[in-house]
Amino acid sequence: MSDNEEIHSHDGFDALDHQLVYVYAPANAPDDTSTRPAKRRKVAKVEALVSGNAPVHTLKFETLLNGLESPECVALRQETFERAWAKTEAQIQSILDEANEDTLGEVTAFVDGTKKLGSFAARVPTGFIVTGPNISSHSLLFKQLSTRLKTEINGPTVVLRSNDASNLKAVLKQLIRDVTNQRPGDGDEKGLYSDQDGRKLLNYDLEILHGYVKAHGSLAVVIAFQDSEAFDSDLISELINLFSSWMDRIPFVLLFGIATSLDLFHERLSRSASRLLDGVQFDVEQSSCLLERIFQSAVAGSEAPLRLGSVLVSSLMERQHDHIQSVQSFIAALKYAYMCHFYGNPFSWLCDDTLTGRNLPNLLRPHHLEVIKTLPSFQMMVDVLIKREQLTRAKTLLKDDKALIQEIEKSQESRKRSITQLLRAMFLLSTSSPEPVDKIELYVTAFQGALAESDFVKRVLDSIKRMDPDDLLTFVKALSNCIENGSAEMNLVGWGDEEDELLGAIIGIYSKVSALEMDSAKTGNPIRSSYAIHSKGVRTTVIAQRVQLSYENSTLTEQDKEFTALVDCLTGRLQECFSQPGNPQELFLNEVWLYDWTVPHKSIFTPRPREAIELALHTPYRYLSCDCCESVEGLSSTHPATAILYQMYLETGSLINIFDLWSAFFEMLGGGEEQKCDERVALVMFYRGLADLKSLGMVKQSKKKADHLAKVAWKGL
Amino acid sequence: MKRKQVEEDPANGHDQEPSAKKSPAGARAAEQTVDDDQPPQNGSTPIKRRYLWRESVPVEEERDSAPSGDESMDGVEQRKPNGELENSIGDDAEPEDITPRKGRRGRPKQDGAENYTNGTTPKKDSLLKTLFSTPTKVNSASELDTPRIERNADRSARKKSTRTLIERTILGNTSDNDEEEEDIAEEIYNSEEEGNIDEDGPGLIGGLAEDDNAPATPSKRGRKKGTKNRRKSPTPPADLTPHEKYFYQNRGGRVKTSNNTLSSLALLNHEEYFSRARDLVDSHARDIEYLEGLHAESFNQWHFELSQDFNICLYGWGSKKSLLMKFADHIYKAQSDHTKAKIVVVNGYVHNLTLKDIFNTIAASITERGYKLGSQQADMLDNLLALLEEDKAQDITLIIHSIDRIPLRRPVTQTLLSRLASHPQVHLIASADHPSFPLLWDSSLRSTYNFIFHDCTTFQPYTAEVDVVDEVHELLGRSGRRVGGKEGVSFVLKSLPENAKNLFRVLIGEQLAAMDEGAGTLEGGDDDNGNDERRLVGHKKNETGVEYRVLYNKAVEEFICSNEMNFRTLLKEFHDHQMIVSRKDVLGTEMLSVPFRKEELETILEDIVS
């Protein structure tokens, strides 16, 4: 009771506000009876929906379409999300594991190898792991490394980070603590801290480590410096000296993670220290490479459940390059795209392939169809129909729900085909290109529907035209190989059986070219295509060039002409193959499987808090959307106190007289002559605003003059 | 307006008249001297200058077409009406019709035409520091043909008065006789300023906070440079880009703020603040509530994001505390098993918060009490994570209010927190208030945190997060109020031994003496302005304080303490109660002072003595 009174007397003061940390319990916790049954009901419902998939928490997706969406669809969306992401995540994880696998193996072998040196090596065996500048992926690598080493090497592994320890003593303490804690339940840690003669050892005495090594028979003590550049170079030198002096008793192995280069690192070490090292260098796969592999599999892969649109991909890549984001952050962004798509798109469940034909008509409700009719892709389809003057078809699609459902089913089936076609074209293009292709860029082009006209295609076709028969033969061979075997990276299976025509044509060309080649070998006349001459002649004047060309043209043999025809045929085929797949953005129902919305990603991963705060204070009605402030530009007495002060603050110079600020503020609030506002109340608001500005780091006390503030922040800078 | 003053002070006006009528060269010379003495006082008002430079471009074309020679030849009397006109239409929308064009006309001639009356411009150029100085000169040039006499007369009066004022303040050699003179001088001086105010349209007053304040209570020092500079800098043009604005507001030259201090304002104490703040009705309460409701609609989404191993960081203006607590409620209701799933709330703004508290509370929430995590922070985290792993069903939702406030700002803290947050069984949702909070985290920390950011501008006051009164008093340099004002000091003193009381008495006495000394040198016998002066000096003294050695010696003399140890112990007590401030001055000597104003010190001293 007295508690209650207390609360009332300190209205608005909550003791919990000033408690450091507490476990949350809702205010109405005691009367559980009222809340419990409701909860249970909710749980039961969800359990039924997710069909026996016992949920850890009763989270479920929001009901979309103004609440009209059926629970089945909601559950289906959630289920589809979980399945789709689990699949993609597994793919990514396997790539990640694989990527560091080589490095891990090498390092483990290296550490293993040091055992043979025995305990009398004069130098400390050291591995330099050149990881590249992306520091955020280092922690993953070193985590993998330490788990790997712990299992495979008989001995403790310690990973040191620069912010763990700043001086020698702290490093040693940390080192010893980590080593001795590594085997939980050994129970003899206490014993380690005292010597045989019962002397108590200081907790940074390497004697402890020595005792530990002896007790466990460890063959290597691996010490990894995760961010070695961030350590003080003197500290590292000292450590190396110390370790080397203990080498006869403790088998140290050092690993340095190096973000810059080995040379730079070497320069930082003292000469005496670097003389004590016996180093091997390991290179880690660079994150850009890794990123491309992940992209190929998770976004461009044939099995990817959700595709990212070209705009989103290019903005993601830009972020990746501009801010050196890690691979992890790309994965997070990808995951977020999945989450957005399935959480917010009422048709996202349609992108599950297994669903096709199962019970599509049952799940598609009238409101779904209504919404589908508003989709741009539907409108585009109808537009196309009208242009082709298939008016009745267009009409039925608009009026007859059954026809629409059929169309949807059809699009479900055709979708996979057209996407695969596109991916195949992309794959062929990237393999047949004379120079390596940026696959992500290729993807962006392809998903803009601009593949056929792109530079990639032009480059490939030009290079084919310039080929001599030998090159052409190898090229054609590689091409047919690709078609037959597919791509492991993109999970493309060979499609030789499906497209007999293309493959047949290619094989035909191959045999004909090889026959020509045989002929020419006999006659001794090299075969050239008419294109090849064009590019060869280097003549200084235009006229001379023309003369040369017409001469060469006239001297083309029959075989040459035949070869030219074959080249033409091949380029024609390829051209057709590249231009066949349409623009994925124009496919009907592409909204279902194509996610191309950059807004959430931008605001969620690259926040602009300062801008938000400045906007809020400068134009409060943007957020408050109140009637009183909206019409007024600039300062207004209706604005919140801090906003008024902030706007005044924006106009001041670098020094602010507090009294003047206060009188202006008071004036603004309508104090002054009208006395709309009590001075003390205005002062309270002034205090609040000033304290807010201070906590935003915008003002500080100025020492230059009495009762003055110094301005610290400028809007928009 | 100006003319009226001239009439009031005819002697001064006549002083200048002859020189104006002299030959052009003579006039120039006269002007030059005037300008040399008081460069910024070129008699033009800010508002006019503003008009001038705004309108200068369209007017420029006309300048050559107008004959220039007649200017110097024209009689003064003829000009008079013009001048009147100019003065009278100062409020009108387009006074530039008359003045600026002429000014413009004169401008290009300055270098070439020797016989042009106004030769002052180049000279002044070097003296002016403000950005928009050129038009000013132009206007002063234009004065030649319009209200020259009045201006000059006026100026000379002003010049004289300024000199008197300067002399008086610097030398302090005023007598009672001078007082009258001074009043007149001040009046003349102010007259111009008042004119400015009147001419400043209401729209412009609102523009600069200092603009409409500074002239309200003009004080002597400001007159010397402050006000003049201020008047030279018109309201900045509205649409400057941010960087231009920065340079505009940071341009060189003296600061140009008024010398008003807060002494006339009774500051708030905690009690008054809270009692009034409680009654405060926010006119936007409904809108704010609506805004929070909007954010609350995405609770489900946030929950989904948390469940997908993302952590959430809310930013934007306004306290997000109540929003987060509502979210906690939302999660609590969604959780099916309250024995395994816990919600831990951290108030990141409480000053004595440490990581240990967070770790210990989490550990206590999932195990029985008394579980020992260890003593080192890193160890504690490792143990805590191991503890979490023991039962995979355990699930911690960590809510951190104000993750970017001082208690959690250290890099080590952030590293450990990020490691905690990256654990799959820990879900972190935090709020951040500072506009540059992302600087807390480098790319590696950022990827460990795996944050998703949401703009949650709530506009709610930071009632719990910010101790408004303390913060403001710190800003105002009145941290002495921490102890609770002079009442607090006497309360503390009551509980201290006699020696401590004596020491404090000595300290205050010394400080007051130092203040009087400092004030005495400059103050003179002038009672009228003495208050103002004393306040300033007093404040300065407040900053300088009493030398440590001096105080110690004094204390030994008075048998308050016998050795330095003793002395230190006594001082420490004061330090603990924030009753004294110790600082190193420029020479490195330790200065002690009591952070109160003179009047307060006097009453405290009376309290102690009585």
Image (cartoon, coloured by chain):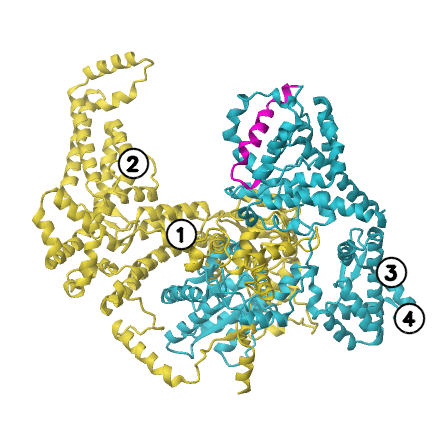
Chain colours: A yellow, B cyan
Do residues under tags 2 and 3 come within 8 Å of each other at their CB atoms? no
Question: Which residue is the site of mark 3?
Answer: B550
A59, B432: nearer the viewer: B432
Spatial CA span between label 3 and label 4:
14 Å
Q: Nearer the viewer, mark 2 or mark 3?
A: 3
- For disc 2, the chain is A
* Residue B99 seen in the figure: yes
Spatial CA span between label 3 and label 1:
63 Å
* Residue A117 seen in the figure: no
Spatial CA span between label 2 and label 4:
95 Å
Q: Quadrant of residue B291?
A: bottom left
Question: Which residue is the site of mark 1?
Answer: A602
Q: Is residue A307 left or right of residue B390?
A: left
Q: Nearer the N terminus, badge 3 or badge 4?
A: 3
Q: Quadrant of residue A244?
A: bottom right
Judged from the image, the secondary structure of the residue bearing numbered disc 1 is helix
Q: Is residue A156 left or right of residue A321?
A: right
Q: Percent from the top left, x then y, of residue B466?
A: 57, 65
The image shows residue A492, relative to residue A55, as above or below, that is above
Q: Percent from the top left, x then y, of residue A144?
A: 45, 59
Q: Which mark is residue B559?
A: 4
Question: Which residue is the site of mark 2?
Answer: A456
Q: Quadrant of the N terminus of chain B?
A: top right
Q: Is residue B170 left or right of residue A319?
A: right
**Span of residues in magenta:** B90-113
Q: Quadrant of the C terminus of chain B?
A: bottom right
Which residue sits furthest bottom? A1
- For disc 3, the chain is B
Say what amino acid the circle numbered 3 marks.
Answer: Val
Which residue sits furthest left? A392
Say what amino acid the circle numbered 1 marks.
Answer: Lys
B16, A266: nearer the viewer: B16
